[in-house]
Amino acid sequence: MKSSKLFGLHSVQAAIDYSPSKIMRVWVDARRVDKRLGVIIDNLMALGIEPEKTDRKKLDRLADGNNHQGIAMEIEMPEEQCESDLKTMVENLTTTALLLVLDNVQDPHNFGACLRTADATGVQGVIITKDNATGITPTVCKVASGAAETVPVYQVTNLARTLRWLKGEGIWIMGAAGEASQTVYQTDLTVPMALVIGAEGKGLRRLTKEQCDILIKLPMLGQVESLNLSVATGAFLYETVRQRLTTQ
């Protein structure tokens, strides 16, 4: 079991909402009078968790100098699942597959934002690489706002091999690439699929791209050449949702 510190009103409330059983310890500023903080303390007390009153200096240390808004929490962190867990999940799917694959994504803010969008769009699992990529960290959890608890994350050692296995299971591999010849709006996204998104500033690696059945892109009508990774992921996933809702 690994634990870490969360801080800030939003992050602590998300932990209360999505993973109350994993809360280990809570500290609050004894001198702070704040309506939102009071509500969170009441929510914690209702769970049988009594926050420890402390001073701002200790909270500053717990939050490594970040803005803690008068509250910090030690919590058992969600953990990445393994390749065998991924195979079990895929083999037992009862709805059309929609997976998100992040190829060497290293920015925890982008990863957290992708998890949040994955939760909102019904993604059944997010696949990440073991090396040269961020895993689930406190920053990821903070940005994900609870989605790190609700969306399974599968860590794999050989992404190309995993993509080949997914294809053998009847899942189409859709790679996001600026040089693609067709846009997301020209592509049938109602099929069982895994959307593959490349790393910040680098895109898909060569071996990853070779495993893709189709490369797709977002139309870019202005002067910029690309979008932020998590913004692009949201656009791709919501077009997938739109198509699937339309065909129901």
Image (tube, helix red, strand yellow):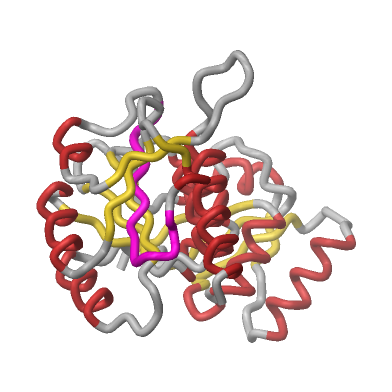
Q: Is residue 164 visible?
A: yes
Q: Is 33 on the left-hand or right-hand side of 234? A: right
Quadrant location of the N terminus in the rendered image? bottom left
Quadrant location of the C terminus in the rendered image? bottom right
* Between 98 and 130, the one nearer to me in the picture: 98
Relative height, residue 43 to residue 15 (above, below) = below
Residue at 26% from the left image edge and 64% from the top image edge: 171
Q: Is residue 62 visible?
A: no
Q: Position of residue 32 (x, y in %)?
A: 83, 54
Could you say which quadrant of the image residue 47 lies in? Answer: bottom right
Residue at 41% from the left image edge and 37% from the top image edge: 182
Decide whether residue 36 is among the magenta residues: no
Q: Position of residue 11 (x, y in %)?
A: 63, 57
* Between 138 and 196, the one nearer to me in the picture: 196
Numbered label tally = 0
Q: Position of residue 238 (x, y in %)?
A: 57, 55
Q: Is 4 on the left-hand or right-hand side of 164? A: right
Magenta stretch, residue numbers? 188-200
Relative height, residue 180 to residue 32 (above, below) = above
* Between 219 and 112, the one nearer to me in the picture: 219
Residue at 22% from the left image edge and 68% from the top image edge: 170
Residue at 50% from the left image edge and 47% from the top image edge: 236
Q: Is 181 on the left-hand or right-hand side of 168? A: right
* Between 76 and 171, the one nearer to me in the picture: 171
Relative height, residue 173 to residue 74 (above, below) = above
Decide whether residue 192 is among the magenta residues: yes
Q: Position of residue 179 (x, y in %)?
A: 36, 25
